[in-house]
Amino acid sequence: MAAKKKRKGRSVQELLGIKTFTTYGLKTSKGELLFYQVVPTNISVLSSVNIEIKIRHLMQVLSTIPDIEITCTDSSECFDDNKAYLTERSREELNPKINKIIKKDIEFLDHIQMEMATARQFLFIARCKNMKAPQVFNLANRVEKTISEQGFEVHRLSKSEIKRFLALYFDASLNGEHMSDIDGEQFFDTEKLYEQEVESDGKKT
C-alpha cells in the first residue's frame, strides 16, 4: 500500500486570501481592494431634516457605486479581553505581591485606553476584478470623487494605513503600519545576500 502524500499546510496569508499590496490597495484572491476612510457625522447635533439629507446622500453613493462595501471597526486596539483576564486572575491570586502587580497592569491598561481614541472608523471598500492598472486608477479616483461630491470627508488609505487597519481588525498589533511587507524580512540583509549572489556568479564564470 503506497504511503499517502502529506498535504502541504496552507499559510495564514492563504487562508485570509491576501496576496500582496498594490499601488492603489490590496490584492486578494477575490480581486484588488481599494480602501476609503469616511469621517463619520455626529447626527446627534443635526436636525431631522439634515439627517434625512445625509441619508439621501449616502443612498446616492450606494446607487452610483452599487458594488461598494462598508465596514465599521475600532479605530484603536481594544484591551477589554486583557482586562477581563487580569481581573479574573486578581480574584484567584492568593499571593498579595503578585496581586499588586496584576492590579498595576489593569491600571496601566485603563490609562492607555483613556489616552487612545475609542471612536469607530468607517471604511468604504471598492473591489476591482479583472482590471488592468489604468482601469484600477480610474476607478480609484471615481469612487473617491463620488463619495466626496455627496458631502462626505473621505480619503483613500495608503499602504501604511491599510496595514494598521488589518492589524486592528485581526488583533495583531497596535503599530500595524510599521509591520514589514513580508513576514521575517527584517531578519535578512538583502544587500549582503545580493553581494554574495553576485560574488558566487563571478566565481562560476
Image (cartoon, rainbow, N blue to C red):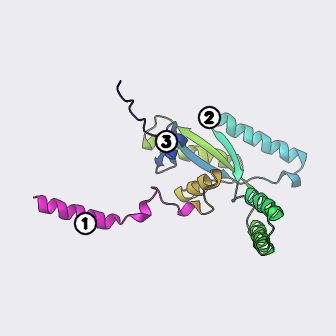
Q: Which residues are magenta?
A: 177-205
Q: Nearer the viewer, mark 2 or mark 3?
A: 3
Badge nearest the viewer, 2 or 1: 1
Depth order, front residue of 130/154: 130
Tell me which residue sits at (75%, 73%) in the image.
101
Cα gap from disc 3 to disc 1, whole angstroms = 32 Å
**Can you say whether 94 is above or below 61 in the image?**
below
Identity of the residue drawn at 73% across and 37% down: 59
Residue 34, image x and y in percent? 56, 46
Q: Nearer the viewer, residue 75 or 143?
A: 75
Earlier sequence position, callout 3 versus callout 1: 3
- Main SS class of the magenta portion in the image: helix
Tag count in the figure? 3
Q: Secondary structure at mark 3?
A: helix
Identity of the amino acid at label 2? Asp
Residue 191 is covered by the magenta coloring: yes
Along the polypeptide, which appears first: circle 2 or circle 1? 2
| Residue 195, numbered label | 1
Give the x, y percent position of residue 200.
Answer: 18, 61
Give the CA distance from mark 2 to mark 3.
Answer: 24 Å
Quadrant of the drawing holding the C terminus: bottom left
Report the amino acid beneath label 3: Glu
Name the image quarter holding the N terminus.
top left
Q: Which residue is mark 3?
A: 14
Look at the image and tell me whether residue 157 can be seen.
no
Q: Secondary structure at mark 1?
A: helix
Horizontal side of 147 relative to 93 (left or right) equals left
What residue does disc 2 label? 67
Q: Residue 79: x and y, percent?
A: 73, 60
